[in-house]
Image (spheres, grey):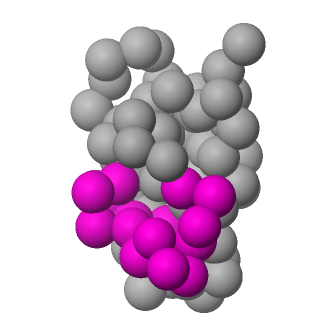
Amino acid sequence: MVDEKDATAGSLGYKPDASKVDKTKFPKFAAGQNCGSCALFQGKAGDAAGGCPLFAGKQVAGTGWCSAYSKKA
């Protein structure tokens, strides 16, 4: 799992719990956005965790969020 203190995670504002995102620092965050609904998430819908190409070799929480969020089509 990616540690939110990881350098890449920190620069992207990654939080394993999207409800803890600093909305002042990341104003593009909107309720309902999370890794599980992101186009970059490599897990299946509903998975607790899955891979992400931004964090090579590590998994992100399905309930997480980072500033690279891009809604799945």
Residue 20, can we see it?
A: yes
68 part of magenta stretch: no
Start-end of magenta stretch: 13-29
Residue 56 image offset from top left, x and y in percent? 67, 55
Residue 55, can we see it?
A: no
- What is the quadrant of residue 26 in the picture? bottom right
- What is the quadrant of residue 44 in the picture? top left
Quick one: quadrant of the N terminus? bottom left
Q: Which residue occupies 46% across, 71% down?
A: 23
Q: Is residue 43 left or right of residue 63?
A: right
Q: Number of marks in the image?
A: 0
Q: Is residue 26 above or below residue 28?
A: below
Identify which residue, 10 or 24, lies in the foreground: 24
Q: Which residue occupies 51% across, 27% down?
A: 37
Q: Which residue occupies 47% across, 39% down?
A: 33
- What is the quadrant of residue 50 in the picture? top left
Residue 54 image offset from top left, x and y in percent? 71, 55
Residue 19 image offset from top left, x and y in percent? 27, 57
Identify which residue, 5 or 12, lies in the foreground: 12
